[in-house]
């Protein structure tokens, strides 16, 4: 049975990226597709899974430099495992810090929404800035 392969356009469509992204990952050494006799890229199922993994890591904020480092360490096998785990632990700490920042910002947004909803409930749908200007003008008269 032959292995499933993808041409660049097919793979781009399947995983939801542009052909340019796939070429960029190839240029950066993150994926190396096979080439047929006509020099056309042929991506394997393993390539697809690897690129999907890279995209997940990128979505967590992993830098291109760290993606390359991850690949290099992974290719070392057992010899690179300790450093690979350290890379992932460091990245996890960064993700957790970003999550904390997002949680704090979400809390601030919730408070602002509550504030505006309370204002609308008490004062109707007047323009908040206009109300501020009117109150400011009355206090200086």
Image (cartoon, rainbow, N blue to C red):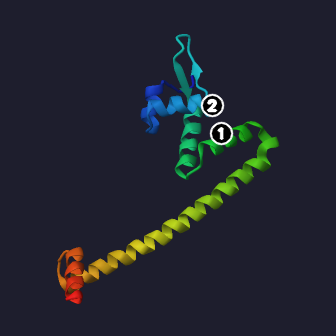
Q: Classify 10 Å Cα crowding around label 2: few (below 14), some (14-19), many (20 and above).
A: few
Residue 100 drawn above or below residue 86: below
Q: Which tag, 2 or 1, sits closer to the chain's start?
A: 2
Depth check, front residue: 115 or 43: 115
What residue sits 68% from the left and 39% below the top?
71
Residue 54 in the image: state x and y as whole percent.
57, 42
User: Image quarter for residue 18?
Assistant: top left
What residue sits 56% from the left and 37% below the top?
51
Could you tell me how far apart the alpha carbons at marks 2 and 1 are, in whole angstroms?
A: 8 Å
Residue 29 in the image: state x and y as whole percent.
63, 31
Residue 46 in the image: state x and y as whole percent.
60, 33
User: Image quarter for residue 37?
Assistant: top right
Q: Left of 29 or right of it: where is 139?
A: left
Residue 140 in the image: state x and y as whole percent.
23, 87
Depth check, front residue: 11 or 114: 114
Q: Are marks 2 and 1 in contact (CB under 8 Å)?
A: yes
Residue 48 drawn above or below residue 80: above
Task: Read off the residue under disc 2.
Answer: 29
Q: Classify 10 Å Cα crowding around label 1: few (below 14), some (14-19), many (20 and above).
A: some
Q: Residue furthest right?
A: 79
Q: Which mark is residue 68?
A: 1
């Amino acid at each position: 049975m032959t292995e499933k392969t993808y041409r660049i356009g097919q793979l781009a469509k399947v995983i939801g990226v542009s052909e340019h992204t796939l070429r960029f990952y190839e240029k950066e050494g993150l994926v190396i597709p096979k080439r047929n006799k006509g020099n056309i890229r042929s991506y394997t199922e393993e390539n697809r899974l690897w690129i999907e993994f890279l995209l997940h890591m990128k979505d967590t904020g992993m830098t291109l430099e760290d993606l390359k480092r991850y690949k290099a360490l992974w290719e070392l096998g057992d010899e690179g495992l300790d450093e690979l785990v350290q890379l992932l632990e460091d990245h996890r700490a960064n993700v957790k810090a970003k999550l904390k920042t997002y949680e704090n910002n979400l809390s601030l947004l919730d408070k602002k929404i509550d504030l505006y909803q309370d204002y609308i409930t008490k004062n109707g749908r007047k323009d908040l800035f206009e109300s501020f200007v009117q109150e400011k003008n009355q206090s200086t008269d």
